[in-house]
Image: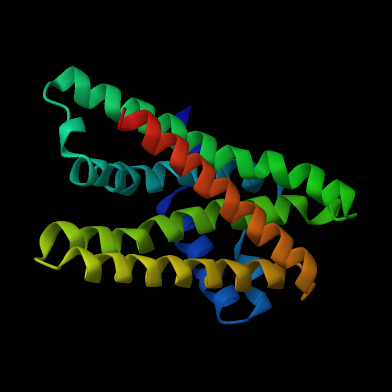
């Protein structure tokens, strides 16, 4: 059952290629992203491709708050269960927020496309975020340099997301800004709640 929901390597590669086309300003990228009903639901399965790196990113809490590092297998399991739960919320909530937004602004026809793009961009952004996280763990960078790199990467991800959404919105600047800000605030809120829960 899960195998039917999780996108194949070919689908993942095609969808990421579509995102890269969109990032470069080429609308042909939309043709590589499956917005059909089946493609819509399977795009949520992109979460399983992002889950391993998401688990790695959550271990950053152990670096920030060393006393929260689990000591037993049960505690490790509990940590990743809770963090994965927040990840699922972060994956599903944007779709739930985009639905009323699209209805209010008369964009119902673009809803499936937006959700598919948002889900696959979630996979791309997870692996982009892996870069500064890996640097923190594997290199003797000072905290200030590490924080600066993380901030630069985060800003780049926001800019790339904005570019992709603007193409989806056919250049509508105000709607693009609104959706981008909504997604940023949603992500930051969930991250803060997760950090508080996992570090308590």
Q: Is residue 99 left or right of residue 24?
A: right
The answer to whether residue 198 is seen in the rendering is: yes
Residue shown at 15% from the left, 67% from the top: 142
Q: Position of residue 78 (x, y in %)?
A: 28, 22
- Quadrant (top left/top right/bottom left/bottom right) for the C terminus: top left
Q: Position of residue 160 (x, y in %)?
A: 53, 71
| Rendered position, 77 above or below 199 | above
| Rendered position, 118 above or below 58 | below
Picture quadrant of residue 24: bottom right
Residue shown at 37% from the left, 64% from the top: 128
The answer to whether residue 34 is seen in the rendering is: no
Query: Between residues 131 and 187, which one lies in front from this camera angle?
Result: 187
Query: Between residues 8 and 27, which one lies in front from this camera angle?
Result: 27
Colouring used for the render: rainbow
Residue shown at 39% from the left, 72% from the top: 152
Q: Specify the farthest residue to the top.
A: 74
Q: Is residue 190 left or right of residue 177?
A: left
Query: Between residues 200 and 31, which one lies in front from this camera angle?
Result: 200
Residue shown at 30% from the left, 58% from the top: 130
Q: Position of residue 71 (x, y in %)?
A: 11, 25
Q: Position of residue 82 (x, y in %)?
A: 37, 27
Counting labels gives 0
| Rendered position, 28 above or below 176 | below
């Amino acid at each position: 059952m899960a195998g039917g929901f999780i996108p194949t390597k070919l689908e993942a590669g095609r969808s990421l290629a579509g995102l890269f086309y969109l990032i470069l300003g080429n609308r042909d990228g939309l043709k590589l992203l499956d917005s059909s009903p089946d493609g819509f639901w399977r795009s949520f399965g992109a979460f399983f491709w992002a889950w391993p790196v998401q688990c790695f990113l959550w271990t950053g809490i152990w670096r920030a708050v060393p006393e929260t590092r689990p000591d037993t297998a049960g505690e490790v399991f509990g940590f990743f269960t809770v963090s994965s739960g927040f990840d699922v919320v972060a994956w599903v909530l944007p779709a739930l927020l985009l639905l009323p937004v699209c209805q209010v602004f008369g964009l119902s026809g673009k809803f499936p496309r937006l959700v598919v793009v948002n889900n696959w961009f979630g996979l791309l952004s997870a692996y982009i975020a892996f870069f500064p996280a890996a640097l923190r763990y594997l290199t003797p960078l000072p905290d200030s340099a590490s924080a600066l790199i993380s901030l630069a990467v985060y800003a780049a991800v926001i800019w790339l997301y904005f570019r992709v959404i603007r193409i989806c919105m056919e250049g509508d600047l105000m709607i693009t800004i609104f959706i981008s800000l909504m997604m940023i605030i949603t992500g930051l809120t969930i991250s803060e709640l997760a950090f508080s829960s996992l570090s308590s």
